[in-house]
Amino acid sequence: MNLPISVTQEELIEILLHIAPVRPVFIWGAPGIGKSALVEQFAEEVGLPCVSLLGSQLAPEDIIGIPQIKGETSEFLPPKMIARKDAYVLFLDELNACTQEVQKAFYSLIHEKRIGEYHLPQGSIVIGAGNRAQDSAIVKTMSSALVNRMFHVQLKVDPSQWLTWAYQNGIHSWITDYICQRPDHLFTEPPKTEEPYSTPRSWHMLSDALKEYGVGACNISEEMLRVVTYGCVSASHGGMFLAFTKQLGNTHLLSEIIKGEAKWPSKPEERDVLYFLAQSFRGRLLHDLPQDKQKLGRDGQFLVHRSKALMKELSAISYEIAQMVISADEGKVLPEWFMLEIVRDLPRLAEGRHG
């Protein structure tokens, strides 16, 4: 399922607070974007314990229980994890990864909060979650009967909200500083091949690894930093992150370059740092330059003025990296009026962009 509208982490909590108490909610989203953590946060906010079941590891009897003979009849005894005396949040994770037989066992639990003769305590809440078919995860077709028993919502990643969470939860400063500069690297869609890729969860894993080695750069060798980085996040993002760590001694280097107080690194051994700074420069232009030139403020006018000189200097060092700054990447393009000025002042660079 791919819903036409997605919500942020804060919006999901609001939806759960209003809808989950009266209707079961199913959360769709890619792996590693925080679905489970948000359900646990919701449970904490409403003051209920959270019990999680992993759909991909369940058999029907794990839900409906096992039969016990009582006199001339039998009854099913529900599992201890589900059969509780007090209200709680039942989180059915990877619900759409379970077999059709297990899905059938969930029907009455989701629709009526009942398993056989056992009813969930008054005030209990049922929430499901799962990945989408395009996420290259274990996904089975969910029956229409089960789909129709739940309210559906799709979660998306919001870098600013994740950073707020990251600061509150002690994520390594290298990670938060990097995502501040490259928020577009917080998440990437799952690849078709078997390889690490960037998600909030994988950046969290990298943070944990860095903490185990200690906070400072002197606590981990360059080679081992490469190992732990490429073992957690996308290769392209990992390379940029490693370049970022090399210039941590001067975290404001890009700002100083824009002000004219520093120069682009030009040594061959600094090429990866140059690439990172150029990418960050492109991100700065995309963020600070309005589509309408009339809305350009004083700071924006200075940035435009300096950008032309910086692009000329960058072209002299690496024509390819300079082209990368002004290229259309992942649908993100610089304002047309700015590109016209680049064409006017740096015609060869602009022509190469279309070559």
Image (spheres, rainbow, N blue to C red):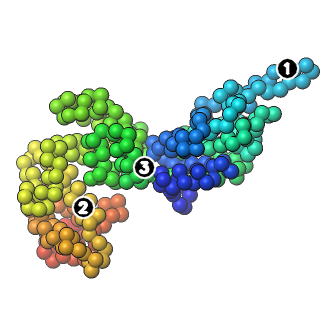
Q: Which residue is mark 2?
A: 284
Q: Which residue is mark 3?
A: 189
Instruction: Say whether disc 3 or disc 1 marks the residue closer to the N-terminus.
Output: 1
Q: How busy is the neighbourhood of tag 3: few (under 14 within 10 Å), some, or many (20 plus)? A: few
Q: Label 1 sits on what residue type?
A: Ile
Q: How busy is the neighbourhood of tag 1: few (under 14 within 10 Å), some, or many (20 plus)? A: few
What residue sits 26% from the left and 42% below the top? 174
Residue 101 in percent (x, y) is at 71, 36
In the image, is residue 111 above or below residue 263? above
Q: Separation of disc 3 and disc 1 at Cα?
A: 51 Å
Image disc number at residue 313: none
What residue sits 45% from the left and 42% below the top? 32
Image disc number at residue 69: 1
Residue 218 seen anywhere in this rendered image of the structure: yes
Give the side of residue 201 with respect to residue 24, left or right. Answer: left
Give the side of residue 45 with respect to residue 88, left or right. Answer: left
Q: Nearer the viewer, mark 3 or mark 2?
A: 2
Q: Nearer the viewer, mark 3 or mark 1?
A: 1
Instruction: Say whether disc 1 or disc 2 marks the residue closer to the N-terminus.
Output: 1
Instruction: Say whether disc 3 or disc 2 marks the residue closer to the N-terminus.
Output: 3
**Residue 291, located in which quarter of the rendered image?**
bottom left
